[in-house]
C-alpha cells in the first residue's frame, strides 16, 4: 500500500521545466539583494507548508519576501505594508518574468538580475523565453507535498549532526532540495564544468569536504530520486553497501540514488536508511571525526 503523505509524482515534464525557470527568476532576485554567505547559501529558497519562500530579502532599509504557494497557486510578494498576489497559471517564462519585475517596480523595489538561466543546457534569456509556458496545478501541488515530506525527514537527519551543516534548502539552479554535512577539513579544487555556472562558484561551494543528500525531481530521461554523494569521494565509496535494497550507485551521476517511488511505497524508513547509510559510508571511508549525536533527554519535545 503506497504511503499517502508521500504523493506519487507522475510525468509532469512541461510543468517541471517551466517551474524550474520561474524559481530561477525568484532565486536570482534573492541572490542579487542578499549579502554573500559561504557556499552560496544566501541564494537558496526554503520549504514552507505551502511551497517555497525566499525568506526576507533586504532592499535598502526595507525587507520583502516572495513565496510560491502550490496549494492555492499564487505567487505572494510581501513588502510589509504592501502586498501583491500574482496567479500561478499556464504562462510563458517571459510573461512571468515581466509580471514579477513590473510588480517589484510598482512596490518601489526594483531589482536587476542576470537574465540567463543557470545549470541548464541551451539557456534562453528569461525575457525571451516563450517556449516554457506550462503549469499543471495538480502536478505543482504534488511537487510541493514531496518537498514538505523531504524537508521533514532531512531536517530531523540534520539535527543529529554536531558539526557544520547547511540548512535544508532548495537550489533553484539544479532544482533540488538538499542538506549538506561538512567534515571541517579543506577539499581539493572542484573541477567545475557545470553547464552555465561559473567554475569559481562551484569551487567555493565545494572548498570543504562534504557529504550531501537531497531530492531531485529528475528529467524526461531520469525518474525523480533521492541522491547522496561525497566530495571528494573517498576510495571505495562507490562500492559501499547502503540501504535500502533499492538504493544503488550511479556511475554517471557519481552518487548513490534511491528512486522516489521507493519512498512513496515504503515511507520515511526508506529515506532515513538511505540518509544514514550513505553518510556512514562517506564518514567511515574518509575518516571523519564522530560528529553525530542525540539530543539530551531534557531537549525532547514535551507539553508545557
Image (cartoon, rainbow, N blue to C red):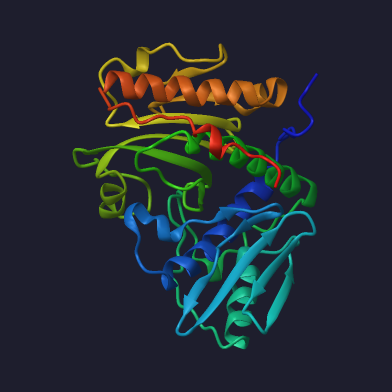
Of residue 97 and residue 70, the one placed in the foreground of this image is 70
Residue 251 in sight = no
Q: Residue at x 26, y 48 (%)?
A: 203
Of residue 46 and residue 70, the one placed in the foreground of this image is 46
Place of residue 255 in the rendered image (x, y in percent of width and height, measured from the top left): 41, 26
Q: Is residue 42 above or below residue 58?
A: above
Q: Which quarter of the rendering shows the N terminus?
A: top right
Of residue 157 and residue 219, the one placed in the foreground of this image is 157
Place of residue 20 in the rendered image (x, y in percent of width and height, measured from the top left): 58, 53
Q: Is residue 298 above or below residue 45?
A: above
Image side of residue 35 versus residue 123, left or right: left
Image side of residue 210 versus residue 31, left or right: left
Place of residue 233 in the rendered image (x, y in percent of width and height, measured from the top left): 29, 26
Image side of residue 234 versus residue 148, left or right: left
Q: Residue at x 52, y 17 (%)?
A: 247
Residue 207 in sight = yes
Tally of numbered tags: 0
Image side of residue 118 versus residue 200, left or right: right
Place of residue 68 in the rendered image (x, y in percent of width and height, measured from the top left): 66, 60
Q: Is residue 254 above or below residue 216?
A: above
Q: Residue at x 31, y 19 (%)?
A: 284
Q: Residue at x 55, y 64 (%)?
A: 55
Amino acid at each position: 500500500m503506497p504511503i499517502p503523505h508521500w504523493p506519487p509524482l507522475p510525468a509532469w515534464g512541461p510543468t517541471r521545466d517551466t517551474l524550474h525557470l520561474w524559481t530561477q527568476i525568484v532565486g536570482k532576485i534573492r541572490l542579487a539583494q542578499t549579502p554573500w554567505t559561504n557556499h552560496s547559501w544566501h541564494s537558496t529558497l526554503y520549504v514552507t507548508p505551502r511551497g517555497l519562500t525566499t525568506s526576507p530579502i533586504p532592499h535598502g532599509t526595507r525587507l520583502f519576501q516572495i513565496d510560491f504557494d502550490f496549494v492555492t497557486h499564487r505567487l505572494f510578494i510581501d513588502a510589509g505594508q504592501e502586498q501583491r498576489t500574482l496567479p500561478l497559471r499556464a504562462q510563458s517564462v517571459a510573461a512571468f518574468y515581466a509580471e514579477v519585475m513590473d510588480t517589484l517596480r510598482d512596490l518601489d523595489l526594483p531589482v536587476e538580475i542576470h537574465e540567463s538561466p543557470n545549470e541548464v543546457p541551451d539557456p534562453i534569456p528569461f525575457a525571451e523565453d516563450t517556449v516554457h509556458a506550462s503549469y499543471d496545478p495538480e502536478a505543482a501541488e504534488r511537487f510541493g507535498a514531496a518537498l514538505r515530506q523531504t524537508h521533514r525527514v532531512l531536517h530531523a537527519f540534520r539535527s543529529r549532526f554536531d558539526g557544520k551543516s547547511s540548512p535544508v534548502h532548495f537550489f533553484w539552479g539544479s532544482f533540488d532540495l538538499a542538506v549538506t554535512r561538512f567534515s571541517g577539513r579543506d577539499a581539493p579544487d572542484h573541477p567545475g564544468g557545470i553547464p552555465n555556472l561559473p567554475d569559481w562558484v562551484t569551487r567555493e561551494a565545494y572548498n570543504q569536504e562534504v557529504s550531501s543528500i537531497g531530492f531531485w525531481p529528475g528529467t524526461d530521461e531520469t525518474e525523480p530520486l533521492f541522491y547522496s554523494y561525497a566530495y571528494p569521494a573517498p576510495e571505495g565509496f562507490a562500492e559501499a553497501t547502503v540501504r535500502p535494497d533499492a538504493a544503488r550507485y550511479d556511475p554517471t551521476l557519481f552518487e548513490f540514488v534511491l528512486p522516489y517511488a521507493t519512498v512513496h511505497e515504503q515511507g520515511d524508513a526508506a529515506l532515513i536508511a538511505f540518509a544514514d547509510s550513505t553518510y556512514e559510508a562517506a564518514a567511515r571511508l574518509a575518516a571523519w571525526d564522530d560528529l553525530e549525536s542525540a539530543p539530551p533527554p531534557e531537549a525532547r519535545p514535551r507539553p508545557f
